[in-house]
Amino acid sequence: MSAASGYSDLREKLQSREVRKRKQPASDTEEEEAELEEEEEEAVAAAEEEEEEARKVRSGVRQVRLFSPEECAGIEAKIDEVVARAEKGLYRDHTVDRAPLRNKYFFGEGYTYGAQLQRRGPGQERLYPKGEVDDIPDWVHELVIRRLVEHRLIPDGFVNSAVINDYQPGGCIVSHVDPIHIFERPIVSVSFFSDSALCFGCKFQFKPIRVSEPVLFLPVRRGSVTLLSGYAADEITHCIRPQDIKERRAVVILRKTRTEAPRLEKALSGVYHPERLSGNNRQHILKPKRSHRKADPDAAHRPRILEMDKEENRRSVLLPKPRRRSIVSSENYWRRPYEYVDSYTDTGEDEGSPARKVKMRRH
């Protein structure tokens, strides 16, 4: 214990605290004991509530270890073929959705989500028009779906949408609920390449990324099938945390779209994706910014934003007031809304060269 504290060691401090406690009136001591008891009761109640929620989640989860290592290797080779075809630009525009540390491949049915939405929020997702994504590959039917039907995990003809999520180490998907108005239940996923985990009830924070403790931590093994329904699918979010993707991992998600699911008009289907490119050029294109953002032609030359920061950045279109002093050269200038640009004066540079703009501050 430091000299500034007035005590030579911890024992002396504890003895002094005990003396003060004995000198307190009995009523004060009783109040402290009552507060402690109340805190303990609240902690016990919270723990019981979490355990009850975890029980509800488990009631909506079914897992089956279905594919042998040899079968997994065969399916993983097919997934690699999908990746190779995408690199060559052999798929339709909306089949492939690239992001740092995670690529998605839509087959059968694709839908808008995240930054692709004109209006964000639950219930705003829309299916693409028929034919906007490639058909489900034959090998998915033969090697994956048929096995699930044979083991009576899903009925024959149930699946009309297949998505392959291909993760690199550190990749993730933030907490979400698969759109209830788009997909029927159960949500079926089959894991390949490595073991991982599915977490329920987490909250994400960003810059740097942080994830709260889950209500339920569900190990997901290579070759296993996970089915979500009921509470686990509809009443609580699920996610994949970056710390749980230690090696490359791919998951095949099999779902059935609802007959009444809303669908984009044909004329609007190309609004949310970049124009089709071939080969490796696709991964360098950035998604077009929504209309309320100011486009920056140099944006493509900046370091790309990590997948786990994307959603937070979308919420940060308006910068906090103390940071709005930055000038045009600021990296975040492209995120400013139109109404933030005050008065500018031209420096009178020659025509044909970019005019340097100087911010006029009001005092």
Image (cartoon, rainbow, N blue to C red):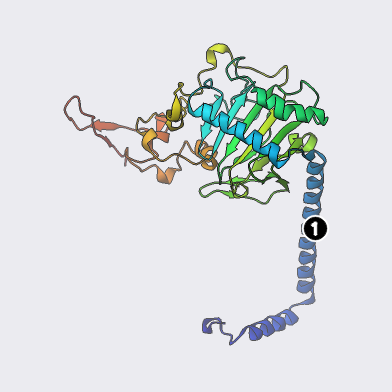
Residue at 68% across, 80% down: 17
| Residue denoted by label 1 | 44
Percent position (x, y) of residue 266?
A: 56, 12
Is residue 185 at all visible to an observer of this figure? Answer: no
Between residue 3 and residue 65, name the one nearer to us.
Answer: 65
Q: Split into 4 quadrants, where in the image is the N terminus?
A: bottom right
Q: Is residue 6 left or right of residue 181?
A: left
Task: Give the image quarter of residue 30.
Answer: bottom right
Above or below residue 345? Residue 1 is below
Residue at 55% across, 22% down: 94
Above or below residue 273? Residue 344 is below
Q: Secondary structure at mark 1?
A: helix
Residue at 20% across, 25% down: 352
Between residue 279 and residue 103, name the one nearer to us.
Answer: 279
Is residue 282 at all visible to an observer of this figure? Answer: yes
Percent position (x, y) of residue 23?
A: 73, 82
Q: Amino acid at mark 1?
A: Val
Task: Give the image quarter of residue 96.
Answer: top right
Between residue 249 and residue 240, name the one nearer to us.
Answer: 249
